[in-house]
Amino acid sequence: MKKYIIEPEVAGQLGDDTVLNYSTKPPIIEKLNYEFDDWLGDDFIEGFQCFICSERLAEYIKKQNLTGYTFDDCKITKSQFFNDLHEDGLILPLFYWFKIIGNENDDFFIVPNSMLVVSQHALETLQAFNMDRCQIQEYEK
């Protein structure tokens, strides 16, 4: 079955309340604070060494029997730049930290260059939601 490298929208960065463990390379995020600089509507978002997804996508993923991931809570904040861009007070949906824990036998896994690889089933699951800014290419070992 085909697998794909996906590069989701990057809508922000690690916030001040992120806790990193620097004893490994790359550092491991122990507590995630994702700070949005903008949001163009995608349900699956990327940041430095992390991914987050909207609550509605998380609920759908749980029903799909996919492997190689777990969910955790994360703190979501908005940068001053975000607030300046969205003076109308754009409200973000609830997001969850989407932790990749899989290997090549799972639906989600990370390859050595820190790229996210997904199965065909996982890709179709993600594409059932807004993924307009996500770059996708076929994965070849």
Image (cartoon, helix red, strand yellow):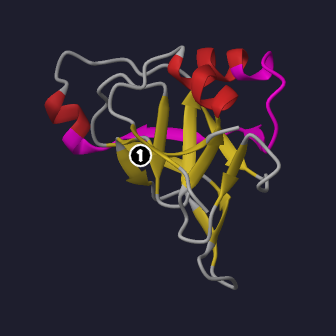
As displayed, is residue 53 above or below residue 87?
Answer: below
Q: Splitting the image into 4 quarters, where does residue 133 fall?
A: top left
| Quadrant for the C terminus in the image | bottom right
Q: Where is residue 139 in the image (x, y as percent from the top left)?
A: 55, 51
As displayed, is residue 68 above or below residue 44?
Answer: below
Q: Splitting the image into 4 quarters, where does residue 60 fall?
A: top right
Q: Position of residue 89 (x, y in %)?
A: 26, 18
Amino acid type of disc 1? Answer: Glu
Q: Name the residue under label 1.
A: 35
Which residue occupies 48% across, 25% down?
43
Q: Splitting the image into 4 quarters, where does residue 10 fall?
A: top left
Q: What element carries label 1?
A: strand
- Between 87 and 4, the one nearer to me in the picture: 4
Q: Is 35 covered by the magenta stretch?
A: no
- Between 75 and 61, the one nearer to me in the picture: 61
Which residue occupies 47% across, 60% down?
48
